[in-house]
Image: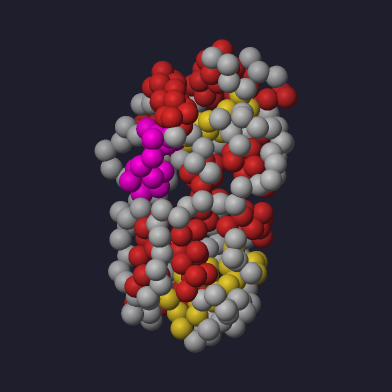
Amino acid sequence: MILALRALGVGDLAAAVPALRGLRAAFPDHTLALAAPTWLTPLIDLIGGVDRVVAVADLSPAPLPEAEIAVNLHGSGPQSHRLLQAAHPAKLWAFACPEAGHLDGPSWNAEEHEVQRWCRLVRHYGVDADGSDLSLIRPAAAPVKGATIIHPGAKSPSRRWPVERYAAVAKQLRAEGHRVLITGSAAERDLAVRVAEHAGLGTDAVPRTDLGELAALVAYARLVVSGDTGIAHLATAYRTPSVVLFGPMSPARWGPPARPQHRAIWHGTRSEPGDSMEPGVHPALLAVRPGEVLDAAREVTGAAAQI
């Protein structure tokens, strides 16, 4: 068995797809297991090639299955290294971490793009990984096709563009003929409803979706406008035109690939080591104006029509 650890969220999982595909190709006769939160299973199924999901959340100590090779696609250690070491794999593939007693891996580079980081890790151990292989399996159907999705939520307040600005974009896009939907997780529904109300949209514009349905909406969408969060990575995976608004993190670390149908907007000067710890929206995100987002939306949808 090959056991990979990636116990994080939607965008994190999407960024690890090329490395997981590399492992699948390198070990076609082995079981490929992914240690991850089970709520991600609908998305894991869309990667293809993962044979088993092992339930892990927040790196909580849990019995992991025996593996010939354990691959840490989660972080630099030491906690994630130790979680895998506790399963006593024959080999551990991970970034060098003296605190965990693991010295043979490559060095960690905090400024590296997240996709390339994990490709570099598995390449260090002889596995070929194509960083451009970000696609997911396209669902057979979607609740709505051709919608423009505006997703105002994000994990931290520092990455949430103000409600009234999202609403201004939604209102103008609807005036230009877009069918606008405002999406969010169950915990973000109140936020999505506020955006819809400010934009003059009814509650029918705020669908209730599980993760699989959200992926299907994105796969068949006309456009996605969001902050630096998981749905932006789904748009990349399906080559759906997207405009992604960045705050504390530079798109050089988490942004979409250089394609005409994707646009990252960032007015920062450097990446923070993590999400800003200050309350409220990050200043780089506050510097983004609705008109700039609308111009980018028109450009990426126009570019997609030419592909």
Q: Quadrant of residue 123?
A: bottom left
For residue 267, side relative to residue 122 (left or right): left
Q: Quick one: which residue is furthest to the top in this view?
A: 175
Give the quarter of the figure containing the N terminus. Answer: bottom right
- Residue 70 part of the magenta segment: no
Give the quarter of the figure containing the C terminus. Answer: top left
Residue 155, position as x, y percentages in the image: 53, 43
Q: Residue at x 66, y 54 (%)?
A: 42
Q: Quadrant of residue 75?
A: bottom left
How many numbered badges does the structure rendering display? 0
Classify 136 as above or below 176: below
Between 174 and 282, the one nearer to me in the picture: 174
For residue 246, side relative to residue 152 (left or right): left
From which residue to which does the magenta span run? Answer: 244-265
Residue 126 showing in the rendered view: yes
- Residue 246 part of the magenta segment: yes
Residue 80 showing in the rendered view: no
Q: Residue at x 43, y 76 (%)?
A: 93
Between 9 and 260, the one nearer to me in the picture: 260
